[in-house]
Image (cartoon, rainbow, N blue to C red):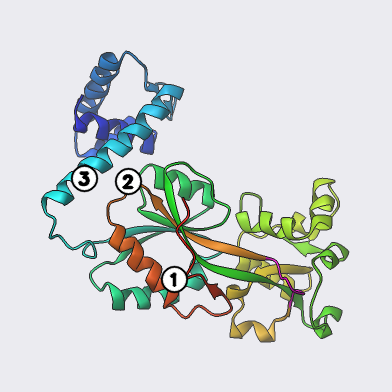
Amino acid sequence: MTLTELRYIVAVARERHFGRAAQSCFVSQPTLSIAIKKLEDELGVTLFERGGQEVAVTEIGERIIEQSQRVLEEADAVKRLAGEHQNELAGPLKLGVIFTISPYLLPRLIPALRILAPDMPLILEENYTSRLAEMLKRGEVDAIIVADPFEETGIEAWPLYDEPFVVATPKGHPWEKQPAIEPCQLSEESVLLLSPGNCFRDQVLQACSELSSRQSHGHNLASALQGSSLNTIRHMVASGMGITVMPATSVGPGDESLLSVVPFSQPAPQRRVLLVTRKQFFRKKAIETLQQAVFRSGLPDVAMLEDEPRLA
């Protein structure tokens, strides 16, 4: 068993295709296929189900590939230790961010990070939480910024900030004159939601149990017109299709002419935003610096959590 063979099986698991995996490893497909078959024979197990357009990973293959990823990371750590004077803040950092955070945090985070670590550019991936979790586990990204709860094994998480939710209505809506909205009032209105699979949708439903009950019983919510992004929903609300709930950072100065934004009554529903990486990831200084850049970003309407301890 060699590190090269482990890199091959991790690549096939990532690409779900032998040809693309071979290209990513800069070898021919026969070379990669022979090496993987040799490893399977040595281990006495089948790692991949061949056939069809896409390669499937077997149950035992998933476990072996996950362990292989850890082995490869430890091998990289050995190389780093051999050059212990190497600067952890030099070289790109691969960062994943969920859709409902990236447009509002990144424009403030990147300038702050350039001051703290000018030689550490970000390679960015914007996606859903579930997809980013897979990419983190496979080493395709170094860290991710997601909303709590986030439950995966082999990770470390740092709380970044708490962000309240607000209610957005069309101009002229009766609620715009109210000082605050109770979560239970949402069930009285047509509420536009993000499409299923987005964690912010789930958090909105959790914030209003009556709304969640209507959704589960198939009542006709405006969520039938689900938006693919907060920006899409913002314009649907402005056009009079209904109301929505938005994270506070997503509300910008330009919204004043389109929407009325009303706070929730206290304690307002909110989400906690986390910075997550693998326990084996060796650039700890890079993660700490990224965390500090978030704290210095000046992101409005949030409570920064600089004194919160790291989560196990």
Quadrant of the rendering where the N terminus is positioned: top left
Q: Can residue 170 be seen in this view?
A: yes
From which residue to which does the magenta span run?
263-269
Q: Position of residue 272 (x, y in %)?
A: 57, 63
Quarter location, residue 249: bottom right
Distance from the alpha carbon under mark 2 to that under mark 1: 25 Å
- For label 1, count other residues whose C-alpha is less than 10 Å away and answer few (under 14), some (14-19) or many (20+): some
Q: Can the viewer see residue 20 in this picture?
A: no
259 with respect to 155 (left or right): right
Dot 2 amino acid type: Gln
Count the labels in the image.
3
Q: Residue 280 carries which label?
A: 2
> Are the residues flagged by discs 2 and 1 in contact, CB closer than 8 Å?
no
**Residue 76 - label:** 3
- Label 2 residue SS: loop
Q: Earlier in the sequence, mark 1 or mark 3?
A: 3
Q: Position of residue 93 (x, y in %)?
A: 31, 60
* Residue to which mark 1 is pinned: 106
Instruction: Please identify, in this view, whether the residue under mark 2 or under mark 1 is nearer the observer.
Output: 2
Determine if the magenta segment contains residue 265: yes
- The answer to whether the residue labelled 2 contacts the one labelled 3, judged by CB atoms less than 8 Å apart, is no
Q: Residue at x 74, y 60 (%)?
A: 207
Q: Is mark 3 on a helix, strand or loop?
A: helix
Q: How crowded is mark 2: few (under 14 residues within 10 Å), some or many (20 or more)?
A: some
Say which residue appears at 23% left-offset and 18% top-offset: 38
User: Looking at the image, is 221 positioned above or below residue 217?
Assistant: below
Report the front residue among 211 and 189.
211
Name which quarter of the figure residue 54 lies in.
top left
